[in-house]
Amino acid sequence: MSHRVIVPIGPYHPLQEEPEFFKLYVEGEKVVDIDIVIGYMHRGIEKLSESKHFDQVSFLVERICGICSNSHPFAYVNAVEDLARISVPERALFIRTIIAELERLHSHLLWLGLAGHFIGYNTVWMWSWKYREPVLDILELITGNRQHYAMMTVGGVRRDIRKEDIPEIKKMTHDLIPVLNMFKGAVMDDPVIHARTRKVGILTKEEAIDYCVVGPTARASGIPIDIRKDDPYGAYDRIDWKIITQEEGDIFAKLVVRVLEMYESIRIIEQCLDKMPEGPIDADVKEIPQGEGIGHIEAPRGECFHYVRSDGTNSPIRHKIRAPSYMNVASNKVAAVGGTISDAAITLAAVDPCYCCTERTAVIDKDSDKKIMNGWDLVRLSQEKTVRLKKGLSK
Amino acid sequence: MNLKLKALTKSLWVFHAACSPCNNCDIEILDVLTPRYDVERFGIQLVGSVRHADVLLVSGVPNYKTAKRLKLLYEQAAKPCFVVSIGTCAIGGNFFRHSYNFVKPVDEIVPVAAYIPGCPPKPEAIIMGVVKLINSLKG
């Protein structure tokens, strides 16, 4: 047996949504096993929510994750509306759907940029973050803030979309299509991206089912699950759109799923703006009765689940949250094992778990406990592989 | 102003330490570096190790796991190193002030040179905070 070392990735320093600690066991270049430890960014939100009013909780759960800052309140209000049997006005449902899709657009663009960075394509990073800005502008136009939109409230939304803003929103959304075409071309035709992502980090359909993965990670492995279709909420059942799936389960499939999903998001937004009826935006909820309710929605990363129980007072007595990355991160156990270290960076990033944790990486020799490599070395290794491939291709 | 400080204000290298934030401050920090705001024009660059950094950007609420590591990070940094606490969480705890896992605000753990409030602060606000920091260093 060759010399086995441990590469700890993480733990405490997650720059992105969820904090993870990956312990990669490597023999030479090959990853032979992986341990995943999560729970480093604990802020006690479920407990805090028991001390807040039903109205305040939606702003609290918004601060679980800055990238999915619409998904959590959306799932939470769905749970409370399920509990109290509230019927939400039509217009509010359409506005909620628009915000949710805008969030998906910005989240997928953000991931695309980071994925580009991890394989050494900083141009992709800069481009996709540049073209993410118009999405944030639309969100600012509608909600008044670039992030943390604070739109969801129990029984409706907090702000209306003004009639005179609609042409502007439509134009800005439509302008994203050429950008997406450019990205689609860049991703689908680039031989280096093909070489780096095809047949790398494969998650087969059976493994995906075993690990209960959700969202784009599952859809890239050929499982057509999407809460928007399976259990429609918001206005998704009144709109024509389709689920994007790919069969391969490798990183390229995940990339393609996300890029194509952005087109669907634009279609959904445009239809919503056309079909949005006039009317009130809030059901004016007076009190929350005793009972329990669940709400789940399709966040950019997969199913986001909230459970709320009430005893008739003005705060929940139990609030349980399950975020999508919790399921997806575990699938790295099969996806990353068997690959090389230089592919580990992109494989672990492919489920979109927020991978900036890499910069806390250190390769430690098991016997001498001496640090050999840090996180940036890992990214550098990955970037060097791209440079090598580029040279090989240009010959 | 001594020579070291004078040289430092020409080009600040920043290291970003996230202490259990919700990521929004972090993506806004990265946003500042990407084309629309592009502070790399002014020599501000994100570095991979705190040992190379002149400025430590802290975001999020320090909890029992991250607070001691934040202190360790500050001790590892080559001095002078200025701490900028970004976002309401890092300044006062925000919503999480009453959480059982909240330790204390960042400025009670490490000395803070500049505060940028907001949840999250807009990229313009972050740039303004950095400009104010540079001006205060110049005296």
Image: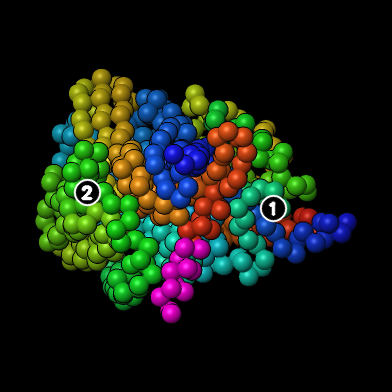
Which residue is drawn at the image coordinates 30% and 35% (left, top)?
A322
Q: Quadrant of the N terminus of chain B?
A: bottom right
Magenta span has A393?
A: yes
Furthest-top residue in view? A311
Tag 2–tag 1 contact (CB < 8 Å) = no
In the image: residue A364, left or right of residue A238: right
Residue A272 position, x and y percent, is 19, 61
Q: Is residue B112 above or below residue B104?
A: below
Q: Which residues are magenta?
A: A384-395
Q: Pick whichever, B117 or A177, lies toward us.
A: A177
Residue B52, labelled with which disc? 1
Residue A183 image-quadrant placement = bottom left
Q: Quadrant of the C terminus of chain B?
A: bottom right
Give the class, few, some or many, for how many residues have Cα within 10 Å of label 1's Cα (few <14, many ≥20).
some
Would you name the residue on which mark 2 appears?
A204
Q: Pick whichever, A182 or B109, lies toward us.
A: A182
